[in-house]
Image: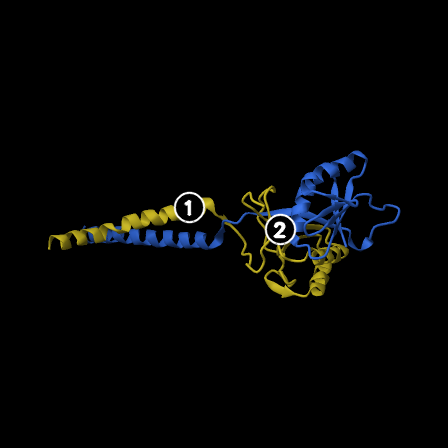
Amino acid sequence: MKLRKKSREHKTESTIPLINIVFLMLIFFLVAGTITTPVSDRVQPPELKTLDVKMPEADLLQITRDGQIYWQSEAFVLDNLIARFQKAGRSELKIMADRKFNAIKLVAILDRLRNAGVKNIKLVTLKGRGQG
Amino acid sequence: MRINNGYSRGRKTLSLTSLIDVIFLLLLFFMLTSTFLRYSNINVASAGGRGINADAAPKVVLRIDQNKLDLNGQEINIDELVRSLNGFVTTGETRTVVFVKEKVSVERLVKVLEVGRNSSMTSLILAQ
């Protein structure tokens, strides 16, 4: 019977440590994480270790392992996309290509983009943790 | 006075739960939107359709194979790449043309480009 009384008291107290922990988690995610534009997990970019951290923007050109092309999370045929870029007079582009994608095909895509006037092309990579 | 008292007491206990609600919402928001991945960029330049003019034929050619690097016909180690490229810079060359062989992955290409960027070559141009 004594025990029961104790447990009742605990019930009212138990919210405060809960709030404490939730607060701690909140602060952790605020400090440790960075808010990103959603990048799909279709593509695993290559890892590098020495470059500075720069978060990607929303209009990434994503190229999957088997060469499918996504832009703004929509699948595209390269010809249509290039036509669209040409129409918009686009000169900058960031490409996130899968690390296993064939580099020759990537160079072919880069050439076609270059011919369409997209001169400033950057490859997005992950910043690795020191190995490799 | 009684009504006032009762009212404010009721509010006091309520504000704690709404506080928790808001904190939970914030927590959820930051958990879902934040990432711990750190992205980076590397510049890539391609020759495009212009091709390479015969009169301005490239004097420094780097070929990337799966496990080998080939600089002007000489097989080199990736550790020697910066030194070799800098050697060409002292003779007046500022551009390197990079050819990629069959079956080379993007990862390999990017890794070599990263090392090449550390040399004083002004540009590494990708060509087909």
Q: Residues within 10 Å of mark 2 (few under 14, many from 20)?
A: many
Instruction: Check the residue under mark 1 and report the chain it is in.
Output: A
Image x and y of residue A6, in percent: 16, 51
Left or right placement of residue A46 versus residue B61 in this view: left
Q: Determine the CA span between mark 2 and mark 1.
A: 27 Å
- Chain shown blue: that is B
Q: Position of residue B93 (x, y in %)?
A: 80, 39
The quadrant of the image that shows the C terminus of chain B is bottom right
- The answer to which image quadrant residue A100 occupies is bottom right
The residue to which callout 1 is attached is A28
Residue at the location (74% across, 43% down)?
B123
Instruction: Please report, as a chain letter, where disc 2 is located.
Output: A
Regarding residue B4, the answer to whether it shows in the image is no
Q: Residue furthest left?
A: A1
Instruction: Tell me where residue A131 sits by quadrant.
Output: top right
Q: As rendered, which of A126 and B62 lies closer to the eye?
A: B62
Q: Which residue is mark 2?
A: A124
Residue placed at 70% from the left, 65% from the top? A80
Of all residues, the one furthest to the top in this rendering is: B90
Tally the marks.
Answer: 2
Is residue B83 among what the camera can see? yes
Which amino acid, mark 2?
Val
- The image shows residue A65 at horizontal and vertical percentages of 62, 60
Q: Which mark is residue B121?
A: none
Image position, residue A9 (x, y; %): 18, 51
- The one nearer the camera, A25 or A59, is A25
The residue shown at (77%, 56%) is A115
| Element at label 1 | helix
The yellow one among the chains is A
